[in-house]
Image: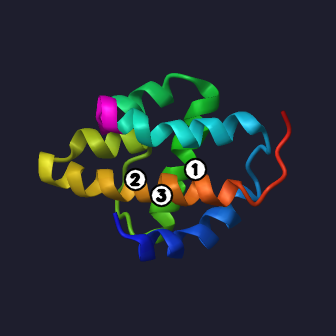
Amino acid sequence: MNNKRIEKLIPKAIKLLQNFPKEAVYKGYLAAFGPTVITSGIVQAVAFYIADDKKKRVIELMFDLLLIEDLKTDKKTLLDVLREGENYKNYVLKNKILEASIACKLAIRTFELKD
């Protein structure tokens, strides 16, 4: 992961979070995403998060951030992008997704969240 890239993503994440629900539960979902990827794998973590409506919003947030940054795809969801890729492509994409999740996790701390 690249710290400079994460720092570059934070202002973009803050803009996306302007229209995001300000609930404390999302802070937890973002904080748990990285460890979930490490223990389960990127495809499994994304599939797990997409299965729940609230967690799905976190995946959509990261996907939107990646689309703004540099992800070129015609796919509608992050899971579709991961399913089409090869192992090397998924490894690179995994790092970009983790960077996006860290940027979102740091950006959401700038908002006052409701319990």
Amino acid type at circle 1 is Leu
Residue 100 location in percent, x, y?
47, 57
| Residue hosting label 1 | 61
Q: How is the image coloured?
A: rainbow
| Count of numbered marks | 3
The disc at residue 100 is: 3
Badge 3 marks a residue whose secondary structure is helix
Q: Does 68 sit above or below residue 47?
A: below
| Residue hosting label 2 | 97
Earlier-in-chain disc, 1 versus 3: 1
Crowd class of label 2 (few under 14; some 14 to 19; many from 20; radius 10 Å):
many
Mark 3 touches mark 2? (CB < 8 Å) = yes
Q: Quadrant of residue 82?
A: top left
Q: If the image is split into quadrants, where does the N terminus sit? A: bottom left
Q: Is residue 20 within the magenta segment?
A: no
Q: Disc 2 or disc 1, which is closer to the eye?
A: 2
Q: Which residues are magenta?
A: 38-43
Q: CA distance from mark 3 to mark 2?
A: 5 Å
Mark 2 touches mark 1? (CB < 8 Å) = no
In the image, 35 versus 57, the foreground residue is 35
Q: If the image is split into quadrants, where does the C terminus sit? A: top right
Badge 1 marks a residue whose secondary structure is helix
**5 displayed left or right of 29:** left
Q: CA distance from mark 1 to mark 3?
A: 9 Å
Crowd class of label 3 (few under 14; some 14 to 19; many from 20; radius 10 Å):
many
Q: Does 5 sit above or below residue 27?
A: below
Badge 2 marks a residue whose secondary structure is helix
Q: Quadrant of residue 89?
A: bottom left
Earlier-in-chain disc, 2 versus 1: 1
Q: Residue at x 13, y 46 (%)?
A: 87
Q: Residue at x 20, y 47 (%)?
A: 85
Q: Disc 1 or disc 3, which is closer to the eye?
A: 3
